[in-house]
Amino acid sequence: MRDINLETRHLIKLASSAAVVWTMLLSAALYWDYISGRDQALSLVAISARANFNKDSAFRFWGASHGGVYVPADEHTPPNPRLAHIPERDITTPSGKKLTLMNPAYMVRQMMNEFEGLYGVKGKITSFPDKLFYQGNMPDAWELNALRSFQKGNKEVHEVAEIDGVPYLRLMRPLFIQQDCLKCHAEQGYKVGDLRGGVGVAVPMQPYIDAEQKTLRNHMLTYFLIWLTGLFAMYALYVRAKAQARKLFSIEQQFHQAQKMEAIGTLVGGIAHDFNNMLAGITGNLYLAKKSMQDNPYALEKLSSVEQLSFRAADMIAQLLTFARKGQVRVETFPLTPFIKETLKLSTVSMPENIELKANVCSEPIYIRGDGTQIHQVLINLLNNARDAVDGNQHPHIIVRLESFKADDDFIKSHADFTAGNYAHLSVEDNGCGIPEARLEHLFEPFFTTKEVGKGTGLGLAMVFGAIKAHGGMVYVESIVGEGSTFHVYLPMLDVDQFDSAAPDENAIVHGQGEMILLVDDASHVLETGREVLGKLGYQVLTASDGMEAVHVFSTNQDDIALVIMDLVMPKLDGAAAMERIRKIRPDVKVIYATGYDMKATVPDDTSSATVLTKPYSIEKLSVVIRNLLDT
């Protein structure tokens, strides 16, 4: 059988593991997104750096291809002293305007300075420290490392590095001497193809970093929402799976409970047949013995006691059948108020003197339809449980209440088993030890007990539950550990005008008038005792020990037989099948079915309206039933 707590823990582990895996997957995806975004930002900056480098290179190549450019000489562009060896470094136009020659490096350097002021992108031509043509071309540490890598054959160096504490993507490529360069740099000993230095650009990273961080924040919010949605979905699945597990557990519990009850019912049903047949023989012989002992009051009293005990034993069998849900409630209408009062009066005798038994029974008439013996047993079991629960309490008390109760809509919503209507509400309250919550759901299971070994069978409350359900009622329990328990029993209540006060008196013997009765039973002791009892009641008796014989005897004496008393469960041909054949012979024949089994299980549907007596039955009742049928 499933362990719901174990399954719940398993579901929690699965849900937790799924949440951890989900978190790790999204974290990995977010990290991958971050790395990809960073690489993409670096790639974009590198593209921008190369574009700026290509722009500067194209400008420098253009200037070199023209041998330089003449521009007006002023403070911003003074004549280049390093070009003093060139004869036409400075010229004057016919109009008298003075121009000076700007070599390509001079042009690019000035353009780079202007571009940095406008757009923040730095540019610089760098030379080796030992061959400086212009002091501003002195390399810094990063540029010097780049120049050294060019000497090793590298074609480009770029990385993120700081300039004055600000991050830039710095890119640098080598600068080789071309023919046009010798005009200015031949005196330094350069030849065409020599590595003169490098040309670099530095693109500020901050705009890209800001854009990357903004994108990252947006992605983090998106991933968080996805993560949260996933967790909610997992929680919803967990709740659903937990509910399904509880539902399945409940169904399994009901199935196992039904199996247990079926097994017990099968066992009890088999015992009931043999036991009731024996009791039928005992009660019949007791009646005959009492008839012969009318002049011996002492013996008559003892025989009557034995007879009462026999019927009490039959009641116990009926209770077991009801407990196993195989019995049929012997329905009669009776007032519950005096019944409860009488039961409490009898219970006082067995109640310890230190226990205060209080009764709060309403004075208004409350009528129910049911089996008085079962209701009596219900109250006795509840009182016995309360008595055991208050054992050890310094001031023990038990309160029994009876009142009429109307189930309204609010009550029905909180109690799904109820239907609207009026109920007799019987409650038994104690101030005992209480029942732990974990045990409440098992309280009405057979053989489950909270008492010590030897103090309880675990059948009492199961019988209570079975009896109340058989009456169409409900039973609930409220309990607080250390404070006590209250058992609530609800039984459908009748209107006052439904009470039948003209019930026949079944305690008086009614004799026959010589009518012939066919008695059919497979138990020889029941057959012999029954023959003698019916004879004492004033009837002629024919007997048969099985269904086949019964059909034969009836067919032979069909005109003389007034009534058939038919056992239902017999070999060769059962009672119902035998009666079907007998009715083909004479349809108007009257019949009383007798059974030691459960009435529901043995009485066929098409004979459910017939008169049925459950063994053992009192001779008084038998005489009344026979007479009523014959007189109808």
Image: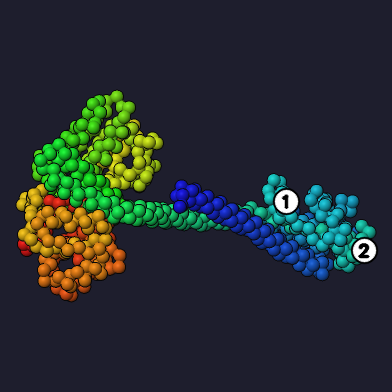
Q: Which residue is mark 2?
A: 191
Could you tell whether 260 is left or right of 365 in the image?
A: right
- Classed neighbour count for the residue bearing mark 2: other residues with Cα under 10 Å, few (<14), some (14–19), many (≥20): some
Please report the residue visible at 77 percent of the width from the left and 61 percent of the height from the top. 107
Relative vertical location of residue 10 with respect to residue 566 in this rendering, above or below: above
Q: Amino acid at mark 2?
A: Lys
**Which residue is label 1 attached to?**
161
Of 297 and 95, nearer the camera is 297
Q: Quadrant of residue 56?
A: bottom right
Number of on-image labels:
2
Q: Can residue 373 be seen from the camera position used here?
A: no
Residue 399 at x, y percent in the picture: 21, 34
For the residues labelled 1 and 2, the Cα–Cα distance comes to 33 Å
Q: In this orientation, does residue 162 appear?
A: yes
Give the residue type that dot 1 points to: Ala
Which of these two is toward me, 271 or 26? 271
**Residue 342 location in percent, x, y?**
15, 38
Query: In terms of sequence position, does the residue under pointer 1 or pointer 2 come before the other?
Result: 1
The dot on residue 196 is none
Give the quarter of the figure containing the C terminus: bottom left
Residue 136, image x, y percentages: 80, 51
